[in-house]
Image: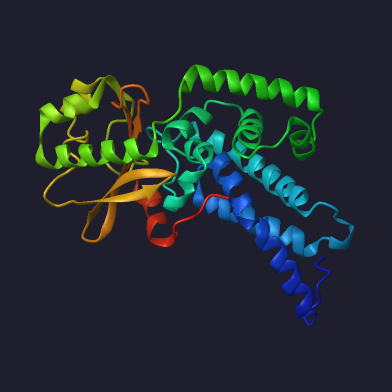
Amino acid sequence: MVHVTPGDSAALDAATTEFEQHRDLIFAVSYNLLGSVAEAEDVVQEAWLAWASARRADIVNVRAYLVRIGVNDALARLNRARRERETYPGLWLPEPLPTDVDGEVNAMQSEAISFAMMVVLESLTPLERAVFVLNEVFGYSYREIADVVERSPDSVRQVGHRAHQHIRQRRGRYQADPDVRRAVTARFLVASQGGDLNALLELLAPDVAMWTDSGGLVKTARRVIVGREKVLRLRDGAEALFTDQLVPSMVHINGGPAILLSRDAAPFAVVALDIDPDDYTIRGIYSVVSPVKLRILDLSAPRRLP
């Protein structure tokens, strides 16, 4: 039951103003957990409805209240999504999220929504993912997280330890410097456009892995392709993505530089690279070619990370 009456516009305006201060945080946490722009927006909407119908005078910490609502809604959605992804056709990657270049001022938040990191986050349990994201990315203490997920601080600390250990084993060192990532992405684009195999071989790590998410709607590899020779041989690999019919441009997606390939002014693919921070070679290529996931690029304005 909503306690703001239709005529009480002042109260509604005040509620809206207060909620807007936390909207970006709710969205960012939800996207980190779900990898879906549309689902994260739904979580934000549900949080607003809960806030609008709450006895707000009784809520001491608005931020904590809204984050608790958002995280628990996102966890319920993530549990459902995990079951659905068991039958997902081919490889799953998150929906591309247009981000503001200024988002790179917070390196950890940019890393957390990178395709490479979100693939690793998929290997965590929903609870481990929530604890890791809240602690590592948004700076919540384990005691604060315990209040959000309604667990004891000790159990949350154990979950967090497992999650951090798993991430370190799977991810190693994080991304290279933003300037290096932009430079390597630009070199990859030039070499791919020109069909310069020697330049591409120099850019790709020997064990480079390529992920392609088509959602079963476009003919692509349905498994991870490992090794630069295999990557370059594939028709939907790094070189073959750039054809006369596709127009490439540099964009800012998921907290970092990426390549947008368009056909007839419509998005055809997004290609994001994971750069080794030691030798600046490309260790991961993440291509989203699912028309369903690319539709969001026409609808979403760039987001500044909170």
Q: Is any atom of residue 272 visible in this view?
A: no
Q: How is the image coloured?
A: rainbow
Q: Position of residue 203 (x, y in %)?
A: 22, 28
- 226 to the left or right of 247: right
Reply above or below: 260 against 9. above
- 230 to the left or right of 253: left
- 283 to the left or right of 195: right
Q: Position of residue 32 (x, y in %)?
A: 55, 41
Residue 47, image quadrant: bottom right
9 or 256: which is nearer to us?
256
- 122 to the left or right of 298: right
Q: Position of residue 282 (x, y in %)?
A: 29, 28
Q: Residue at x 75, y 67 (%)?
A: 15
Reply above or below: 58 against 293. below
Q: Residue at x 33, y 41 (%)?
A: 214
Give the number of marks. 0
100 or 53: which is nearer to us?
100
Reply above or below: 170 against 47. above
220 or 21: which is nearer to us?
21
Q: Position of residue 144 (x, y in %)?
A: 77, 37
Q: Is any atom of residue 155 visible in this view?
A: yes
Q: Residue at x 52, y 20 (%)?
A: 168
